[in-house]
Image (cartoon, coloured by chain):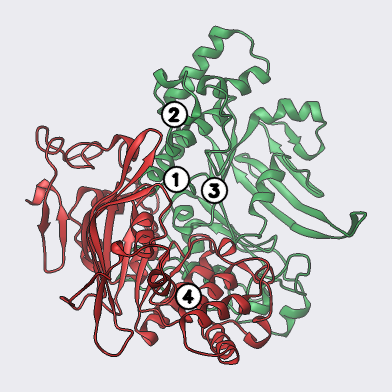
Chain colours: A green, B red
Amino acid sequence: MTTTNHTLLEVRNLTKEFPLRKGFFNRTQGSIKAVSDVSFTINRGETLGLVGESGSGKTTIGRSLLRAIEPSSGKVLFHMDEGQTVDVTSLGMNELRTFRRNMQMIFQDPYSSLNPRMTVRDIIAEPLVVNGTSNRTEIDAQVRDIALRCKLNIEHLRRFPHAFSGGQRQRIGIARALALNPAFIVCDEAVFALDVSVQAGVINLLQDLQVELNLAYLFIAHDLSIVEHISDRVAVLYLGRLVELAATPKLFANPFHPYTEALLSAIPEADPDQPMRPVALAGEIPNPANPPSGCYFHPRCRYAEEICKTTTPEWKEYQPGHFAACHFAGELALKGVENVKEGEA
Amino acid sequence: MNTLPAQSDALLDIRDLAISFKTDEGKVRAVDGVSISVKPGQIIGVVGESGSGKSVTMQSILRILPGNAIVERGEILLRQSRNGSDAEVVDVTQINPNSKRMRSIRGGEVAMIFQEPTASFSPVYTIGNQMMEAILLHRDVNKPEARTIAIDMLARVGISNPERRIDQYPFEFSGGMRQRAMIALALSCNPSLLIADEPTTALDVTIQAQVLELMKDLQRDLGMAILFITHNLGVIAQIAEEIVVMYLGTIVEKGPTREIFHNPKHPYTVNLLKAIPKVGQSRTRLAAIEGNVPSPLERPTGCIFHTRCSQRTHGTCDVYAPKLTQIGPDHTTSCFLYE
């Protein structure tokens, strides 16, 4: 994978295995590969959407990047503004703590991710305090500045989280993530728990902040219309492996992987005149403890041939910027979403 | 027993329903003046955000409301055509929730499926056991016959190998299969009305698409009516023939699906449709609705939406409640802009 000077984050062959414990003595009996051999890059100020079904490893990837869980192998390289490169995976515990100011996370559930016994001011100030800012007036000024950016009411800073609605709580979560001025934020289903009318406001806020602060997002979601709306590029995950990655309009208009085609066909369009014609997938997502041979998708793929059962397809760049892992990438006539034009950007 | 003569061809007729909850902070109005009419074989979609009263309304049809709920006024007329051909209309609100009569309606004539299929099955009985219990309760069959019906239903909802699957426990089923099994369970007693409360929200998109197709097929084959509750406008556009839009316990707009999506009238519906991202229009800015859904403890006076409405007029919207106005043949809305 090529890197340019716009590249902020480079993920190389990231793998995470969880031990599978069984029996009276909790002995390790094999392992589950939640994420295997995943490589991608994220540029400065860019949003990379990450989609996949439950159990595909989206959250595991998001957390591994920040080392909220330890990856089993692979590298996460962070290219700093000053030109130096930091290998996040090899940092010691103390170094990691100071380095984490560069990368933050916004969580799915704004109800359980805020401490109910801290005021909003303290919640937003905590990362500053932890990272060594001790001057109270300085902290107050910063908290106020961030709160304003996130369109929170300054007068409400002394209140506790319970006094806020879901949308406002999510803004508090965003403000906390921004406190240390990070370059990269993982948004793990950040708008999923919100009501439709409030969700739009939070999406707009995330987009505004991105432009203002040149933030890069890894936007994890399973709602494809939201991912299409917010992402510059989209990566599709199936059973812990990336199956496709491309610029958003490209991926939606002209998918290279049959799984992407199936996902796109299942988007319920909010238009009664565009009836959904879902591609029927045989069976269910397999058990990750016992994945199929060859291409993980072959038992459910309608284009599968003999080679798919035996050989794992290579992750390759088939067109500039368009990656896929399929033996027949580019050869199949796969259907995208009709009203997306490939040239759009 | 409170029986009324059959007046219309409606299968279910909810009229001016109002429900409150007794809480420590006082009485909270959850549903206020809701009227919905369902014809046999019709799919009606009910959309609304949290606190819109959609689930409470549905629970009241089966009388499974929590203990602190009070039905303040209104009636829920259900047409029963069980005994012979003579249709008989009962007011569900007048039946004792614990009576035999109510139990025969619940699961028999009106079935319900829930959002969380995991929580809806008992983990200690097999799927077949739980299906047969319902069939034996509501239909005049013996055990082997009930088992055959259960296997048939499982096959019908697309579960492969139903003869073996029927003896498995819920934990042996995946999420999508459990949701199918729940649909099979709900349909095994030939209900004339199926209430589906966010049935696809917990599912992945590909499985959601399958479940929606399945529900449409079953509705066509069995001719039952479906009340489909969701907050997902995409799902509702795909499945419903008619849409009811609810906000804070009242219906703000009601009409055929095409009308609601192409010709929305109420400012809430209009804004809601602008607030969702549509594929193919990326990078256009979403129109967020200002403010938040008010707490039910502080219901706004006048029009309930006026606090967030960009077209409100002072002195009218914040004081008087708008009346229901006819827009088209089946299209109604409650807004002063159209009175």
| Amino acid found under the numbered disc labelled 1 | Leu
Residue displayed at 65% across by 88% down:
B163
| Amino acid found under the numbered disc labelled 2 | Ala
Mark 2 or mark 1: name the one nearer the start of the chain: 2
Say if A279 sits above or below A7 in the image: below
| Amino acid found under the numbered disc labelled 3 | Glu
Tag in front: 3 or 2: 2
Q: Which residue is mark 1?
A: A194
Residue A149 placement, left or right of A321: left
> Could you tell me which chain the residue with mark 2 belongs to?
A
Tag on residue A163?
A: 2
Give residue B256's position: percent from left, percent from top.
22, 68
Q: Nearer the viewer, residue A88 or A164?
A: A164
Tag on residue B186?
A: 4
Snapshot quadrant of residue A65: top right
Q: Secondary structure at mark 4?
A: helix
Q: CA distance from mark 2 to mark 1?
A: 16 Å
| Amino acid found under the numbered disc labelled 4 | Ala
Q: Secondary structure at mark 1?
A: loop
> Could you tell me which chain the residue with mark 4 belongs to?
B
Q: CA distance from mark 3 to mark 2?
A: 23 Å
Q: Which residue is mark 3?
A: A189
Residue displayed at 64% across by 69% down:
B174
Q: CA distance from mark 1 to mark 3?
A: 10 Å
Residue displayed at 33% across by 36% down:
B297
